Image (cartoon, rainbow, N blue to C red):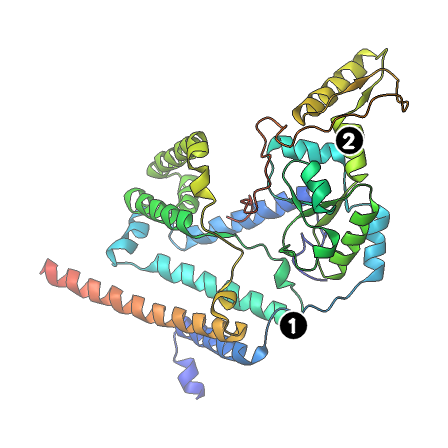
């Protein structure tokens, strides 16, 4: 049996929605367990007092990367069939900044806001309302921005393609980057905590 | 050594584990398994027999009208025929150019040609190269003309059929075609003019090479 199961026709469109639902519930559950249903915790990221978001996200990235890499190497997964979001450099940079502003102001990103709504937080419900409104506005103005939306297309690119480095080397480098990031993040957290303690005295 | 490991916190153990896996990746090679073609004859035969690799012209028309963009429509005919007429949103990749085309393994690809033979051959080529999401437009452009652009609408319809054919008419008009009423299917009918390429109102008429896919997060 080879993965991805959907592309190999193991299940169809209908079942894929059920699978997506189960995956989504699992995703939300672990976000909640990570404490990501609290806007305070998420916003603390941007004040460098609590870098949990950074650590969790980077952990997810290297877990997925190492997992996908080895599953492909042993022949369980056909990596060329895995969907990659195409890169549109400029619009995605602008979109990322926009999302970042919303993240700092509202204290949630779209996924975590859903998690927080399901745990009954009122601020998250307001946030989700804003998200829906934003989607509506985007849909309405889309004809005006559609040219920009598809500008600077780079296709489905990967780091090995851009850099020309061997795949395994990049896996190693990204793992090193993550481990360095974790050490750095804990250092920053300690630094900020002692600064806070100093200020309180 | 054992003490050293036992004294590590869970986070550090996991970090160490990640480091080891990352280090081993240096020697494990590429995850892509080359470009040699392998064919699982039985699997292919099953797919062909069950016809799960087909898309009907009606389904395709619905998708285009709905503005779906999670697939790439590939016209396998030559450039001249393509320039004369093609299904809206199609891209031209002649059969001989299939090898150098920028088709990705992870895309949903729908092939069509005049009839069905070239699509079937191209389908086999792509299947052998490990493509999974390749579909053939059933009946090709011929069927597209018969069923979508110039559908024959019989006279003396039952009320239920009237409703059914009303949709057919709308679809035909959307793509700039003309529904044919009556049973005159004989050759005496003048040659039907193919619609101009910008015909579909509102739909994407030009093949945008960089369509956004509605997949991923």
The kind of secondary structure element at disc 2 is: helix
Which quadrant of the figure has residue A124? top left
Check residue B100 in the rendering and tell me which mark sits there, or answer none: none
Local packing at callout 2 (Cα closer than 10 Å; few below 14, some 14-19, many 20+) is some
Q: Position of residue A53 (x, y in %)?
A: 36, 57
The kind of secondary structure element at disc 1 is: loop
Q: Chain of mark 2?
A: B
Q: Where is mark 2, residue-wise? A: B145
Q: Please state which of the two labelled residues, at mark 2 or mark 1, is closer to the viewer.
A: 2
Q: Position of residue B25 (x, y in %)?
A: 53, 76
**Where B127 sits versus A102, above or below?**
below
**Where B102 sits versus B24, above or below?**
above
Q: Residue at x 66, y 70 (%)?
A: B33
- List the single residue furthest toward the left: A201
Q: Residue at x 65, y 35 (%)?
A: B88
Left or right? Give the position of A149 relative to A21. left
Q: Residue at x 79, y 15 (%)?
A: B160
Q: Where is mark 1, residue-wise? A: A74
Q: Between A90 and A9, which is closer to the camera in this rendering? A: A90
Q: Position of residue B142 (x, y in %)?
A: 81, 35
């Amino acid at each position: 049996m080879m993965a991805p199961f959907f592309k190999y026709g193991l299940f169809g469109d209908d079942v894929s929605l059920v699978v997506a639902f189960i995956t989504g519930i699992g995703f939300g559950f672990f976000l909640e367990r990570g404490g990501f249903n609290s806007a305070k915790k998420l916003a603390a990221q941007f004040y460098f007092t609590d870098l949990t978001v950074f650590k969790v996200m980077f952990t997810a990235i290297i877990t997925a990367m190492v997992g996908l890499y080895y599953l492909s190497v042993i022949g369980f997964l056909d990596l060329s069939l895995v969907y990659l979001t195409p890169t549109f450099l400029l619009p995605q940079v602008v979109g990322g900044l926009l999302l970042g502003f919303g993240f700092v102001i509202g204290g949630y990103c779209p996924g975590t806001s859903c998690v927080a709504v399901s745990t009954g937080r009122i601020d998250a419900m307001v946030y989700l309302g804003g998200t829906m409104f934003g989607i509506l506005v985007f849909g309405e103005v889309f004809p005006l921005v559609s040219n920009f939306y598809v500008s600077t297309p780079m296709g489905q690119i990967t780091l090995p393609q851009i850099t020309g480095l061997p795949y395994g080397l990049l896996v190693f480098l990204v793992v090193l980057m993550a481990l360095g990031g974790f050490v750095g993040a804990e250092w920053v957290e300690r630094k900020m905590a002692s600064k806070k303690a100093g200020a309180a005295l | 050594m054992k003490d050293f490991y036992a004294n590590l916190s869970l986070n550090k153990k996991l970090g160490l584990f990640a480091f080891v896996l990352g280090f081993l990746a240096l020697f494990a090679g590429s995850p892509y398994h080359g470009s040699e073609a392998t064919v699982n004859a039985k699997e292919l035969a099953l797919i062909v027999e069950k016809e799960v690799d087909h898309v009907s012209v009606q389904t395709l028309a619905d998708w285009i009208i709905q503005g779906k963009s999670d697939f790439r429509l590939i016209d396998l005919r030559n450039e001249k025929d393509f320039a004369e007429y093609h299904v809206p949103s199609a891209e031209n990749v002649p059969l001989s150019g299939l090898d150098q085309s920028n088709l990705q393994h992870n895309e949903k690809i729908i092939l069509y040609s005049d009839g069905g033979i070239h699509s079937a051959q191209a389908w086999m080529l792509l299947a052998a190269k490990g493509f999974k999401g390749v579909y053939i437009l059933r009946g090709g452009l011929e069927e597209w003309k018969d069923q979508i652009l110039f559908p024959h609408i019989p006279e003396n319809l039952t009320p239920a059929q009237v409703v059914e054919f009303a949709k057919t008419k709308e679809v035909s008009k959307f793509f700039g075609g003309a529904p044919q009423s009556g049973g005159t299917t004989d050759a005496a009918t003048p040659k039907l003019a193919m619609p101009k390429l910008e015909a579909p109102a509102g739909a994407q008429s030009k093949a945008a090479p960089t369509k956004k896919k509605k997949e991923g997060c």
